[in-house]
């Protein structure tokens, strides 16, 4: 076991996969000499050289496409998009190309490519640099979308993503990069499967579902509610496509109440999808309608008071939980 | 370093090559004519883009691909599939949406491919496949394979951002790829002059310090010589190039477009006089490489081959709707999770079996 940050866990996963498989290579802006905008690829350019850690121009559509082509030829590119906001200029390559190829060509050619990219907000980065767009991709057949919230998952799921035969959007989070945790030693060859949500805190009174950084917020909300005697079950989705609704439903079956929190907008979001599934399967279990909390439905503003008002902070998640519980006569 | 090629009369290659070029172009012409007819009989659905008139640009370039080289093309791709040697019956079956089609009925007219012959598609978004072709060249470079990529696209693609990004990446990374603009004069109904600030498309290579040149796309021999030379340079010297092959499509943009409102009958007639197949036939008979009888025999032969292809494709089965979910993903590990995701039966509790994987 090693105590590392989320950032270091990702770096180690990349390092180990580069060392394990010659077909793996990294591609992205500033990932070489500059060591990555968020330093996730620190030291890898020196260790593996410019061919396996390929620095690109600011040309997202171009190099995501190049990743697709290289993957079709049998390589395993790991493409870094500096933040998820910049993937929009490569959207045609991701949605119209990567997600379609295996199906459209009748299963004759695969695209084993990973796109790593951080989302998240909270540092006054404003409207064009504060988005969490993973739900857009999670709604697209052909894509796999994962968003680990813990250090161990970041490490184990990145390894799984690189070894996967399909295009994977691997969503990191700017706030999570400095999170501390532990990862197993390299010789354990630790991987975390997709499509398996984790119950990260058990409880009987409320199911609180989240992914990525919002899981950390959810755990703090659960602590606060526990002081009033409410036991919250916190579920970390980990993977958005495939989505493990079954673990969520099992929990709701027990708690009879569900709240979904996410960093992106709720409308047409992860919470919308899960609410539909929970209502379908747990209709008779529910004491109250499923609730959702997300970013305020505005482009992220700059001024700190406005930004705080827009973020799905613990206070908002807790308030939604208390309202839901009050409706059920629990609080 | 860039130049416009002079229009000197072509020196025919050896008899076998000349015959092959003629036959492949004739096969495509006949296939496309019958495809048009099959479309009007409602055996083909969706979009259907014919390349009648462009055979010289297609065949001249593909003929010089060697084993290991890769081909990418736009959605006007029937000719490419035939030129790489995919069985015409499998190509027609794809147009018919049959299970025996090259993409098992999942792709249709725009998404033909043949991975075994290194033909990596038929792509439907204008310009979208150029970065992907660059990635294939990157893979060749990355793995030290001594091959090259030929990436064909229409004139319309040259005004997309993907075009610029692809050529820039290929140039800064010294990749073995030849970009071939098949300039058929129109992106749908918009002329090159209307849409391109520099209508001599080959000149844009200068923006990437890349070799560029323009050849007569209706002269299959000239195309073959030029692309052959550029592919060899790409293989041996690891450098990209741009070639513009100037040609014309006699038909509309797709079978839904009569192709008449944006151009004159005189213009079409003038181009027909430069028809690539007729030209090669005349040259070959003049030089005694092919006799008139041999040419007639080739036409009869390809007509029979296309008829057989149609008959075989007609007789093939459509894909079973039970296979709808096959091929969405290739990795078998998360099969159960995806099966559980189906709307209406989130956990498969209604007994629906999602056979999304082969």
Image (cartoon, coloured by chain):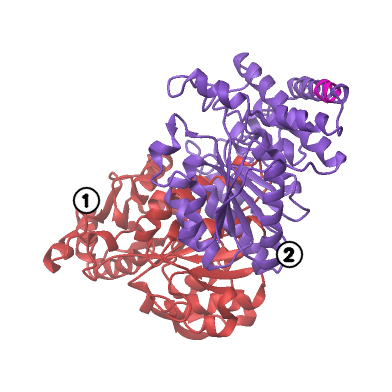
Query: Height in image: B39 above or below A280?
Result: above
Residue bearing the label numbered 2:
B146
Residue bearing the label numbered 1:
A297
Q: Which of B329 and B345 is in front in this view?
A: B329
- The chain that hosts pointer 1 is A
Figure quadrant of residue B113: top right
Q: Which mark is residue A141?
A: none
Residue drawn at x 60%, y 15% as measured from the top left: B40
Q: Is the magenta stretch mostly helix, strand or loop?
A: helix
Query: What hue represents chain B?
Result: purple
**Residue A208 as seen in the image, left or right of residue B222:** left
- How many marks are shown on the rendered structure? 2
**Residue B344 as seen in the image, left or right of residue B89:** left
Q: Nearer the viewer, residue A106 or B129?
A: B129
Magenta highlight on residue B299: yes
Residue B51: % across, % down: 61, 30
Residue A123: % across, % down: 24, 71
Q: Looking at the image, which residue sits at the far top?
A: B41
What segment is highlighted magenta in the picture? B295-300
Query: What hue represents chain A?
Result: red
């Amino acid at each position: 076991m090693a105590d590392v940050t989320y950032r270091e866990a990702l770096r180690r996963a990349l390092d180990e996969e580069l060392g394990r498989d010659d077909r793996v290579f990294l591609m992205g802006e500033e990932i070489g000499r500059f060591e990555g905008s968020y330093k996730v690829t620190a030291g890898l350019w020196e260790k593996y050289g410019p061919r396996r850690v390929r620095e690109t121009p600011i040309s997202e559509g171009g190099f995501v496409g190049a990743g697709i082509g290289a993957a079709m030829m049998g390589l395993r590119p790991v493409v870094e998009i500096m933040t998820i906001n910049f993937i929009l200029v490569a959207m045609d390559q991701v949605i119209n190309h990567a997600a379609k190829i295996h199906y459209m060509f009748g299963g004759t050619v695969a695209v084993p490519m990973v796109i790593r990219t951080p989302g998240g907000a909270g540092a006054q980065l404003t409207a064009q640099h504060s988005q969490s767009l993973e739900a857009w991709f999670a709604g697209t057949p052909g894509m796999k979308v994962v968003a680990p919230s813990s250090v161990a998952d970041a490490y184990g799921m990145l390894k799984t993503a690189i070894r996967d035969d399909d295009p994977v959007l691997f969503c990191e989070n700017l706030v999570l990069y400095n999170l501390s945790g532990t990862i197993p030693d390299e010789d354990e060859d630790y991987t975390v499967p997709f499509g398996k949500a984790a119950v990260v805190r058990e409880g009987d009174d409320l199911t609180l579902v989240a992914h990525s950084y919002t899981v950390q917020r959810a755990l703090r909300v659960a602590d606060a509610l526990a002081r009033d005697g409410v036991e919250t079950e916190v579920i970390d989705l980990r993977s958005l496509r495939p989505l493990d609704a079954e673990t969520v439903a099992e929990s709701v079956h027990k708690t009879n109440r569900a709240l979904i929190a996410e960093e992106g907008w709720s409308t047409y979001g992860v919470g919308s999808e899960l609410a539909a599934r929970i209502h379908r399967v747990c209709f008779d279990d529910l004491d109250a309608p499923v609730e959702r909390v997300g970013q305020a439905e505005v482009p992220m503003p700059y001024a700190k008071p406005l930004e705080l008002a827009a973020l799905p902070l613990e206070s908002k998640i807790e308030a939604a939980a208390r309202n839901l519980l009050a409706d059920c006569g629990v609080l | 370093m860039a130049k416009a090629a002079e229009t000197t009369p072509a020196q025919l290659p050896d008899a076998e090559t000349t015959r092959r070029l003629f036959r492949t172009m004739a096969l495509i012409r006949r296939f496309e004519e019958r495809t048009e007819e099959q479309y009007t009989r409602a055996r083909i659905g969706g979009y259907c883009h014919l390349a009648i008139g462009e055979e010289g640009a297609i065949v001249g370039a593909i003929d010089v691909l060697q084993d290991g080289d890769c081909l990418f093309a736009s959605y006007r791709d029937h000719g490419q599939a035939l030129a790489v040697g995919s069985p015409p019956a499998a190509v027609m079956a794809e147009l018919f949406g049959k299970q025996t089609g090259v993409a098992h009925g999942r792709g249709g007219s725009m998404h033909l491919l043949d991975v075994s012959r290194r033909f990596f598609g038929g792509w439907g978004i204008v310009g979208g496949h150029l970065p992907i072709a660059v990635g294939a060249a990157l893979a060749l470079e990355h793995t030290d394979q001594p091959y090259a990529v030929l990436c064909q696209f229409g004139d319309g693609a040259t005004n997309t951002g993907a075009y610029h990004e692809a050529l820039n990446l290929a140039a800064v990374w010294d990749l073995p790829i030849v970009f071939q603009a098949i300039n058929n004069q129109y992106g749908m109904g918009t002329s090159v002059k209307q849409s391109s600030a520099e209508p001599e498309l080959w000149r844009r290579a200068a923006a990437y310090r890349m070799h560029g040149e323009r050849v007569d796309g209706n002269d299959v021999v000239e195309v073959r010589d030029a692309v052959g030379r550029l592919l060899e340079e790409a293989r041996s010297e690891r450098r990209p190039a741009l070639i513009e092959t100037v040609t014309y499509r006699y038909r509309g943009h797709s079978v839904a477009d009569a192709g008449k409102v944006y151009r004159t009958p005189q213009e079409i007639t003038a181009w027909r006089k430069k028809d690539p197949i007729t030209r090669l036939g005349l040259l070959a008979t003049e030089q005694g490489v092919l006799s008139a009888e041999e040419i007639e025999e080739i036409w009869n032969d390809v007509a029979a081959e296309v008829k057989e292809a149609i008959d075989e494709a007609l007789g093939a089965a459509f894909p079973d709707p039970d296979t709808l979910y096959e091929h969405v993903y290739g990795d078998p590990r998360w099969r159960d999770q995806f099966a559980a995701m189906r709307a209406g039966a989130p956990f498969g509790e209604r007994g629906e079996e999602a056979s999304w994987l082969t």
